Every structure is written in C-alpha cells, then in structure tokens.
Image (cartoon, rainbow, N blue to C red):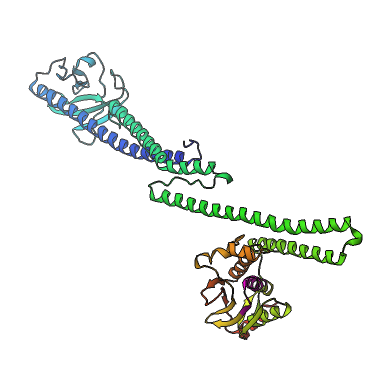
C-alpha cells in the first residue's frame, strides 16, 4: 500500500490537482457570480422602471392616492412622490408617515438620478434610490423616488452558496480522482518495490512482476535483467570462492605437511628440497593475491601512465625475459606505436601468453602488426581450442571452463579478465577469433599514426 505523506509523489500529485481544480473553479465561479449580479442589477432596474410606469400616469391625471398600492408580485419596492416643496404627497405602505428618503435632484438637466443609501430615511439596509423628475406639475417640478434593494456583485446568497458548493464538490472530486489514479498507476511500482525488498542472497532466483504499462514495464524488465546479471555474478562468485578456497588451501596444506614432517624428522629431512617446495607454494599464493589486487586497482579506475611505445619491442622484451615450456614463434612488425601504460599492457599480454602456454600442445605464435587505425597483437596456441558459445565466458571473472580446470589446476580464472579490463582501459578490444587450430586471441589498441608529432606535442606540453 502506498504511504500518504507530505513528501510522497501521490500527495504532491493530489495536492497539485486539487489546487488546479480549485483555481479553475474559482475563476468560473467568479464569472458566474458576476453574471448573476449583472442579471440581478438589471432586474432591479426593471422593477424601478415598473414603479415609474405605474405611478407616473396617476400623477399626470391628478389621481394620485396618498397610499400607493404595493406590487402584486410581492417584490419589495418603496415609492415616494414629493411635490415641488419636497413634501411627501404619496408613498407605499412602508414609507407612510416617513420623511423623504432623499431630496437630491439631478443638477445636470437629466430626468433621472441614482444613488445608494445605507440606509435611506425610513428604510432598513442599503437601498438603491432612483429619483425621476416629473415636469408640468402645479408649483414646479415634482420628484418620484423609487427604492429597491441594493444588489451585491455576486447577485444573491443562493448563487453564492451554489458557486461555493459546486467549487468545493468539483475540487474534492478531482483531488479524489487524482489520488485514486496515481495510486492505481503506481501500484505496479509498489509491487516491484515489495518484491525487491524481499529478495535476499538466498532468493536471487525471484523476479519482480512485469505490468502492462509500457513505461513501468520497461522498468520491471530492466530490474529483472539486472537481477539476472546479479544472480549470474553471484553464482560465478560462489564458484570462484570454491575454486580459490581450494587453490589457496592446497598449497597451504602442502606447505604445512612438509614443514611438520621436517620438524618431526629433522635429521632425515632434505631441507633444501623442502624449502624449494614451500617456496613454490608461496609463489602460487602470491600469484593469486596479485591477481586479486590487480582487479581491485582496475575497478578503482586508477589513472594510466601513458607513453608512446613500440608494441613489437615491448612484446619482444617481455618474451626475452622468460623461459617457456612451449615453442614461441614470433612475427613482430616494428614501428607499430601505441600510447599506453607499459606496465599494464605488459601484464595484459603476459596473461594471454601464460594462458596459451597452459593450453598449447607444442607451439605458441605471437604476432604484432598494424591493421588500419589499430595495432593488433595476436596470441595463437595449437591446443584443443574453445567452442564458439564459450568464447565470451572465458573473459568473465572467476570463470574456468571444465576443460581448462582439468588441464590447468593452477589457474584462478582471473588472468583473461584482467587482460580484457586493461585493454578496455586503453579504449581497445580483446576477443577470441576463428583459427584453423587451437585458440586465437586478438588484442587491438588505437595506433599512433605520427609518433614524431605526438612526441613533439608531449614536449611542448611538458612544464
């Protein structure tokens, strides 16, 4: 269930929708009330005109009664007739015996004048008083005053209550709709979150539900793909832990046994031979630890110390330092320059050659050549080869194929992973390609086309 709190997206969307709905409803309500107020004002003006039309003939004909009759429709209307001396000569019932509600007359020659009084004499509340001049009467100009209730801008209380009620209802409905729709739309996200919260290291085979909504569907599929990779990496890690534990335990156990046996029979022990065996075990442990430390540095993205380097000379120098159990066939083209960290590239191609030596039958071919914009380093062995579907697997960390494990009990499954990561750090590629026999590793790095230009630039950049 989605939580309702001030920082939740559901709360924000609901409040935003409610605010927009309230603004829209307020705007329409104001327009509606202004319209109603205009209509009410027009109707009030009409009632005043009706009073004029009803009383004026009586004045003209001299049949004006002292008590003017009320409207038959029951509408509130107060009328007074003042003579030329401002004396009340006729009035409706509510103004009988009351003083003139107003004696102000138009001074600009107009027949009609209007003012709002709060209240007029003899009446209660604010009233709009309309005064009409009546000419041709004995003694001068008479005054016909008609008072009608003042109309507020919103028209009447009924319209105001209706507008407020409708606005509140529509705003509440829109907010409730937004709350429901956001909850419905994010229910799949909550299901994904709930499932992820329950996934542990012992349940990596579980996957989040995939909804129908395209956007959230893409999220769920991405999460499941990530879980697939995580499960695969975890299985590889478990396999590596098992292999590494065996690889570490074997030399340690052997060294312990040799030392214990020597201590038990010190006079009968060949100590130089024992020391040589222990040293071999230590070197094995050192190789495993070194591989792990190298991977840690690569993961940390340690900076590269780049220098222009002839790849053929670098490979030739490294091959000359070591003695190999298999025949090494060299095909090294000179003047194939790359900009690289020499120590790391040396480590990378050394791992490739070591891997080839462990799996070759009798011969390893190492070649360097320029191939368009790249420098290519190939290491080919004449061993059993690797199936096409397993070629990418050998570059995964901690991966050792079954055939490799049988032939090479000393491998850690890290050498080729290290070589590829070093290559990719130099914007290069390391792949396995087809060959007539055995396995053909191809390392490609960006080639420096003009070494003299690069060296000149480096000298100019130097402090």
- On screen, residue 438 above or below 411: below
Q: Is residue 180 in view?
A: yes
**Magenta span has 279?**
no
**Residue shown at 80% from the left, 63% from the top:** 278
Residue sticking out furthest to the left: 61
> Where does residue 205 sit, x and y in percent of width and height?
52, 47
- On screen, residue 275 above or below 382: above
Q: Which range is magenta? A: 347-365
> Where does residue 333 sit, x and y in percent of width and height?
61, 85
**Magenta span has 357?**
yes
Left or right: 62 in relation to 29:
left
Which quadrant holds the C terminus? Answer: bottom right
State the image quarter where residue 42 is shown.
Answer: top left
**Residue shown at 83% from the left, 64% from the top:** 274
**Residue shown at 30% from the left, 24% from the top:** 126
Residue sticking out furthest to the top: 97
Comparing 142 with 95, the one in front is: 95
């Amino acid at each position: 269930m989605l939580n309702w709190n001030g920082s939740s997206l559901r709360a924000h969307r609901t409040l935003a929708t409610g605010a927009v709905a309230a603004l829209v409803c307020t705007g329409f309500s104001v327009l509606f009330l202004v319209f109603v107020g205009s209509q009410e004002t027009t109707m009030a003006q009409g009632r005043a005109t009706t009073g004029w039309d009803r009383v004026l003939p009586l004045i003209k004909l001299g049949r004006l009664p002292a008590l003017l009759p009320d409207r038959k429709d029951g509408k509130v209307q107060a009328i007074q007739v003042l003579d030329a001396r401002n004396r009340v000569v006729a009035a409706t019932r509510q103004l009988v015996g009351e003083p003139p509600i107003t004696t102000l007359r138009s001074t600009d020659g107009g027949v009609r004048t209007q003012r709002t009084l709060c209240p007029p004499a003899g009446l209660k509340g604010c009233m709009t008083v309309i005064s009409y001049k009546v000419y041709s009467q004995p003694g001068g100009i008479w005054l016909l005053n008609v008072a009608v209730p003042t109309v507020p801008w919103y028209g009447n209380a009924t319209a105001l209550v209706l507008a407020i009620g409708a606005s509140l209802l529509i705003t509440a409905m829109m907010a409730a709709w937004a709350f429901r729709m956001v909850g419905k739309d994010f229910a799949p996200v909550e299901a994904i979150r709930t499932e992820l919260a329950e996934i542990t290291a012992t349940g990596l085979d579980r996957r989040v539900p995939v909804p129908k909504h395209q956007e959230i569907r893409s999220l769920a599929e991405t999460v499941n793909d990530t879980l697939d990779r995580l499960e695969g990496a975890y299985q590889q890690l478990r396999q590596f832990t098992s292999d590494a534990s065996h690889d570490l335990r074997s030399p340690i156990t052997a060294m312990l046994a040799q030392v214990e046996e020597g201590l038990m029979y010190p006079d009968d022990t060949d100590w130089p031979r024992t020391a040589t065996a222990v040293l071999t075990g230590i070197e094995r442990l050192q190789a495993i630890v070194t591989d792990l430390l190298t991977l840690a540095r690569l993961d940390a993205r340690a900076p590269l110390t780049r220098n222009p380097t002839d790849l053929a000379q670098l490979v030739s120098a490294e091959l000359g330092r070591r003695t190999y159990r298999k025949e090494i066939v060299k095909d090294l083209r000179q003047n194939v320059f790359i900009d690289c960290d020499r120590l790391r590239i040396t480590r990378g191609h050394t791992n490739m050659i070591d891997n080839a030596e462990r799996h070759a039958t009798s011969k390893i071919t190492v070649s360097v050549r320029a191939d368009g914009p790249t420098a290519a380093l190939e290491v080919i062995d004449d061993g059993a080869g690797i199936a096409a579907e397993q070629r990418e697997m050998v570059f995964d960390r901690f991966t050792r194929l079954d055939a490799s494990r049988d032939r090479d009990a000393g491998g850690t499954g890290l050498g080729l992973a290290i070589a590829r990561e070093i290559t990719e750090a130099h914007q290069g590629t390391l792949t396995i390609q087809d060959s007539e026999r055995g396995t053909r590793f191809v390392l490609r790095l960006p080639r420096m086309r003009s070494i003299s230009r690069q060296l000149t630039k480096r000298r100019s950049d130097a402090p």
